[in-house]
Image (cartoon, helix red, strand yellow):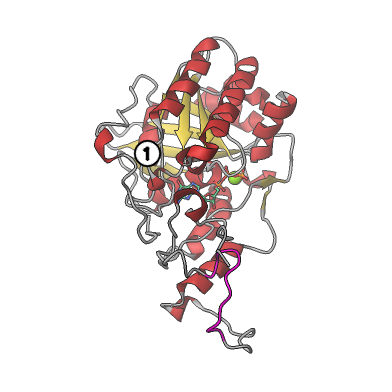
């Protein structure tokens, strides 16, 4: 029987045709329809641990299942809107509005920034303080647990909030290396359903806080744009989001940055960016581009692009870098073993 799609959420086989575990795709037992003739009948009680070494696929499966219960981000761990506004009046603070459909990589981006700062590898800035450290710890739990291994895994879980009507903000205070200047940054980790409801039901009430945002990140799932079969629909949904956002955002518009995730599986297609940017121009919105690889299954460093994204976010006058400097190598990247150490 011909084997079907891969059942692992994290595997990019269904998009790229390559296995994230670097297995021959005709022999991977995570694919639908695979029958394992070699497995003993009575091995159901087998327990796999991190030390199982070569037994990566099973370990990957265990990681990919993720926590039994979805941890919710309690509003007590984040900053409320009043507190956020009060901080903005006292200190030079940049509030970022983060929108994006489920799985677009919103939480992963915040986790990646946190881990880069925690490890002192955040280009151009150092961690100075945070009023919401416990919230960062909460959303980073998955990635921390597996950071020493070398296996792919679901490093973040779907975001659910205890209070589904009010945005809660995560906070960082950063110190810029070049001049020692401090920057406060406020970023909400919202569930993708909020953006979905904005697109499908024009439910924008929950996004009223965007009126205080200096910069908007429009997060999109890089996997959907990498696959020619899903690309057009992904562009269409992103254009819809831009159109809806135009109703919610004040004039003059805050700065808007399109942030595709999964840069580790390849460059974001330039035609997709052009179409989304053109949709923005129809609504007096200038949209720049900053692709990121919050984690990495590919040959770019995990966290790549995240410090640059925050740098252009904090320095509103800086122009975004060129993302297609060498069109020749586009699409030739191959997946290599997951590099988990940020
Ligand atoms: N390799 C890789 N994995 C990523 C990247 N961004 C996100 N992921 C993974 O993609 C999945 C979805 O990412 P999340 O950050 O949880 O998505 P989200 O937008 O917060 O989704 P919701 O909370 O459901 O709205 C997670 O398993 C992440 O680990 C990336 O740049 N590279
Ligand atoms: Mg999330």
> Which image quarter: residue 19?
bottom left
Residue 102's x, y, as percent?
62, 42
Q: At numbered mark 1, what does the secondary structure look like: helix, strand or loop?
A: loop
Q: Nearer the viewer, residue 234 or 163?
A: 234
Residue at horizontal 58 percent and vertical 49 percent from the top: 135
Can see residue 42?
yes
Magenta span: 29-39
Q: Position of residue 30 (x, y in %)?
A: 55, 66
The residue that mark 1 highlights is: 267
Q: Quadrant of the N terminus?
A: bottom right
Asked if residue 213 is positioned above or below residue 160 in the image, the reply reads above
Q: Is residue 341 left or right of residue 70?
A: left
**Does 155 sit above or below residue 41?**
above
Chief secondary structure of the magenta portion: loop
Q: Is residue 86 visible?
A: no
The residue under the point 41% across, 28% down is: 289
């Amino acid at each position: 029987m011909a084997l079907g799609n891969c059942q692992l959420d994290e595997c990019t086989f269904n998009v790229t045709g390559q296995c994230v575990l670097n297995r021959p795709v005709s022999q991977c037992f995570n694919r639908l329809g695979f029958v394992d003739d070699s497995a003993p009948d009575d091995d159901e009680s087998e327990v796999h641990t991190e030390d199982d070494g070569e037994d990566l696929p099973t370990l990957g499966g265990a990681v990919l299942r993720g926590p039994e219960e979805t941890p919710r981000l309690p509003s007590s761990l984040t900053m409320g809107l009043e507190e956020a506004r009060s901080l903005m009046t006292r200190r030079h603070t940049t509030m970022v509005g983060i929108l994006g459909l489920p799985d677009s990589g919103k939480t992963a981006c915040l986790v990646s920034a946190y881990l880069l700062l925690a490890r002192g590898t955040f280009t151009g800035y150092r961690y100075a303080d945070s009023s919401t450290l416990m919230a960062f710890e909460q959303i980073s739990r998955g990635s921390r647990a597996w950071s020493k291994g070398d296996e792919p895994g679901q490093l973040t879980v779907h975001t659910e909030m205890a209070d589904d009507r009010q945005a809660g903000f995560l906070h960082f205070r950063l110190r810029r290396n070049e001049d020692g200047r401090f920057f406060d940054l406020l970023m909400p980790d919202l569930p993708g359903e909020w953006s979905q409801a904005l697109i499908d039901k024009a439910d924008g009430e929950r996004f009223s806080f965007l009126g205080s945002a200096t910069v908007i990140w429009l997060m999109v799932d890089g996997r959907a744009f990498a696959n020619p079969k899903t690309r057009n629909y992904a562009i269409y949904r992103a254009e819809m989001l831009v159109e809806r956002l135009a109703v919610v955002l004040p004039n003059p518009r805050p700065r808007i940055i399109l942030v595709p995730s999964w840069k580790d599986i390849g460059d974001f297609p330039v035609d997709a960016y052009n179409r989304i940017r053109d949709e923005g121009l129809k609504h007096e919105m200038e949209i720049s581009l900053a692709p990121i690889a919050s984690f990495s299954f590919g040959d770019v460093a995990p966290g790549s692009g995240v410090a640059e994204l925050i740098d252009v976010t904090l320095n509103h006058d800086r122009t975004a870098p060129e993302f297609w400097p060498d069109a020749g190598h586009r699409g030739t990247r191959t997946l290599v073993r997951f590099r988990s150490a940020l």
